[in-house]
Amino acid sequence: MDAWRLSEAVSLRAEAFGGMAFHRERGVTLEVDAEAYRFLCTCLQPRPLPLPGEPPARLVPQLAHLGFLVQAEADLEQAQAALDITWLGDGFTLSAPETVHLAITARCNLSCPGCYVPPFDVRGELTTAELRGLIDQWAAMHVFQLAVGGGEPLLREDLFDVLAYARERGIVPNLTTNGLLLDSGVIRRLERAGVARVNLSWNGIPSQSKGGPGDGQQRQGRSIAQALRVLLDSALQVGINLLVTPSLLPHLGQVLARLRTLGVRWVTILRPKPPAAPSEISRAWYEANRLRRADLLRLRDVLSAWQGVLHLEVDSALAGLMGHAEPAILRWRGVYGCAAGRRICTVWPDGSVTPCSFLADLSAGNARHTSFAELWERGKNWEVLRDPTARPQGGCAGCDIALQCGGARCVARYECGDLFGGDAECPHCREAVSA
């Protein structure tokens, strides 16, 4: 009888609802109930397939198709401890982040007026040894992915060592960069470090003027086009993080067509969001570039036209654009809306831990002084984000997809001082519709 086992590229993690399985090569995450999770754990060692009448048998074709189950050629064992987690979460908050967002440095070679990164003293950044220690802690907690950004992460001299160590410890490293420092040599080093995906951040259309604030965007636009040509010839998955502003929106179709011509397949659409502690400059930028309801309706139409042509993703602040979908379908697709402090978190250059990059004032503590597992489990200052009974209020109250969307919480707080105040600009917001 043929023996099958769990692929060595799969990480398992127990949760209160059952467990999770993450395929490190395909970037696919499965959430399963307790029965299915127990079956996956039995596949850590080679075993025969379940008989047709046994409940796990229905899972096997899907697991094999997705590459989670593979035929065992010998008595191979998975070097993966899947059950040594002391806290299993509560079913709403996970036992550990799916992804940790690491702002590895606050240094940057651009000066974007809408930057959300708070000021940090470069001398206080986490050292290489401290970062390796954190990676060890994340590996012990079975964190699946590490999203490294900044600032501009390529300004950090030890970046490649940190990325390679994450991969060595079984965590998939991804990189977000503005692209200005990318060249063939850097890209080869990223490949050797085991980076899965490089996301290029693009914050708007290049300005036609010279000598003004648009020059940085012009320079970045040229750099992205150059970097893309080299990146797309590499083994790295390449994505574009596209910040859609009112000035970019009329040209969005042209931009997507150009990216497709260049060979880009993955585009993530980002909504402008207010920083946690906006300065006069960043507040003025946000007010000038925020997307109003009419903009979001237009954006929805453009994305609908391009869905299937490119692999389009949207950030959690745009989950409301899916208001026409059935909640069950959104759950099946893994749409969780704002997952800050429940499924993700951000670690800043000085070691402070916050629920996300746009709630940088809600620190749970510092990983230099307290173990990361304790910070995550305790979730100090994140209680309201982790309350499974909390519901968006205002115009979001009663929305069919409120549980899958949750509203753009940083936007709601900026508008009315309440994380659950509702997103008045959302096309499905009742206040917006009735206005």
Image (tube, rainbow, N blue to C red):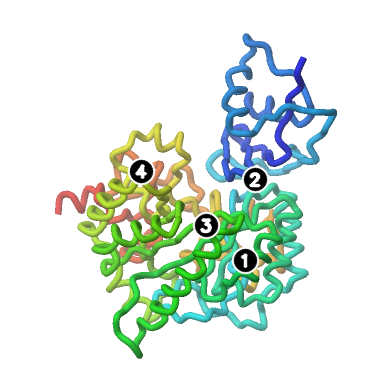
Per the model, the C-alpha gap separating discs 3 and 4 is 32 Å
Q: Earlier in the sequence, mark 4 or mark 1?
A: 1
Circle 4 SS class: helix
Residue 419 visible: no
Circle 3 SS class: strand
Which residue is identified by label 1?
187
Per the model, the C-alpha gap separating discs 4 and 1 is 41 Å
Q: Earlier in the sequence, mark 3 or mark 4?
A: 3
Per the model, the C-alpha gap separating discs 4 and 2 is 30 Å
Q: Earlier in the sequence, mark 3 or mark 2?
A: 2
Crowd tier of the residue under label 2, counting other residues whose Cα lies within 10 Å: few below 14, some 14–19, many 20 or above: many
Q: Position of residue 188 (x, y in %)?
A: 66, 65
Q: Is label 1 in contact with label 3 (beta carbons under 8 Å)?
A: no
Crowd tier of the residue under label 3, counting other residues whose Cα lies within 10 Å: few below 14, some 14–19, many 20 or above: many
| Residue 356 located left or right of residue 322 | right
Disc 2 versus disc 1: nearer the observer: 1
Q: Residue at x 45, y 38 (%)?
A: 333
Per the model, the C-alpha gap separating discs 3 and 2 is 16 Å
Which residue is identified by label 4?
402
